[in-house]
Image (tube, rainbow, N blue to C red):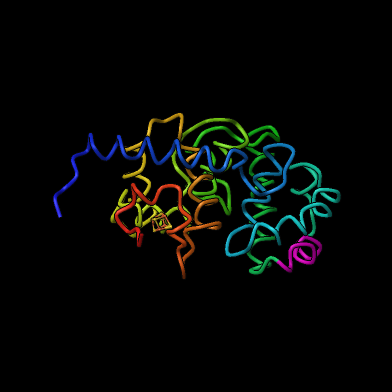
Amino acid sequence: MKRESLARKRERAETVFGRLREEYPDAKVALNHRNPYELTVATILSAQCTDERVNQVTPELFRRFPDAESLAGACQDEVEELVYSTGFFRSKARNLIGMADRVMEHHGGEVPRTMGELVKLPGVGRKTANVILGNAFGIDEGVVVDTHVKRVSKRLGLTRKEDPVQVERDLVQLFPREYWTLLAHLLIWHGRAVCSARKPRCEECVVAPLCPSSRV
Ligand code: SF4
């Protein structure tokens, strides 16, 4: 197969983005939150857990610990009990309290707004930091690469990489910065709705004519 030039690929990426945006006009982060603190907590809890499950535990958690100050002073046992059903509850509880502690100690109680500062918070890696920057602060710092983003990007021929950091590097080269946060939501929504891991429904896919993996 002929190799696609970068310019061509960018053009195709732009069209894919447009079609997905039309298809999923409501695409947004699925974790319920009212402020950066809540989104940080919810995103830490979402590791190895569904967003639905996280949304079940956060109302009580936020009621009990409405801000970084209260969470920094929390008792580990109580937090463990509240987050138990999200899995890895011991390390998640430890990270939540550690995150809140650092936010109090170094940032005056406010979640920081830079990648460099965010990744120093316990439980926050590059992916979590991208979620927070893009969705709590409206800063397009990178593309969140989860399992859906990786799979759909590969099928669409936008990357060949496996490692999320390298996938992100490929995607940021293809899409303008102002697309980055929404792009992840669109790929996630498309991955859940149509381009599933087991059985992609190419016959119903709005980007099938642009997809090298299409079966139609
Ligand atoms: S055509 Fe098929 S493989 Fe390609 S994005 Fe659509 S559902 Fe996925």
Q: In the orientation shown, which residue stands out farthest toward the left? A: 2
**Most prominent secondary structure in the magenta stretch?**
helix
Q: Is residue 187 left or right of residue 94?
A: left
Using the rendered view, name the quadrant where residue 36 is placed.
top right
- For image coordinates 70% across by 59% down, the residue present is 52
Instruction: Name above or below for residue 56 compared with residue 106.
Output: below
Provide residue 107's location: percent of width, then percent of height: 64, 34
Depth check, front residue: 35 or 197: 197
Q: Relative to the observer, which residue lies in front, 10 or 81?
A: 10
Most foreground residue, 207 or 8: 207
Quarter-wise, where is residue 179 in the image? top left
Q: Residue 185 in the image: x percent, y percent? A: 53, 45
Q: Ligand 1 falls in which quarter?
A: bottom left
Q: Is residue 189 magenta?
A: no
Residue 89 horizontal side relative to residue 77, left or right: left
Q: How many marks?
A: 0
Magenta residues? 76-85
Classify the position of the N terminus by image quarter.
bottom left
Who is closer to the viewer here, 48 or 65? Answer: 48
Q: Magenta span has 79?
A: yes
**Residue drawn where x is 74% and y is 63% of the image:** 83
Whole-percent x and y of residue 103? 65, 40
Q: Residue at x 65, y 57 (%)?
A: 51
Residue 130 in the image: x percent, y percent?
51, 42
When the figure is inspected, residue 17 is found, relative to residue 215, above or below; the finding is: above
Quadrant occupied by the C terminus: bottom left
Residue at 54 percent across and 48 percent down: it is: 128
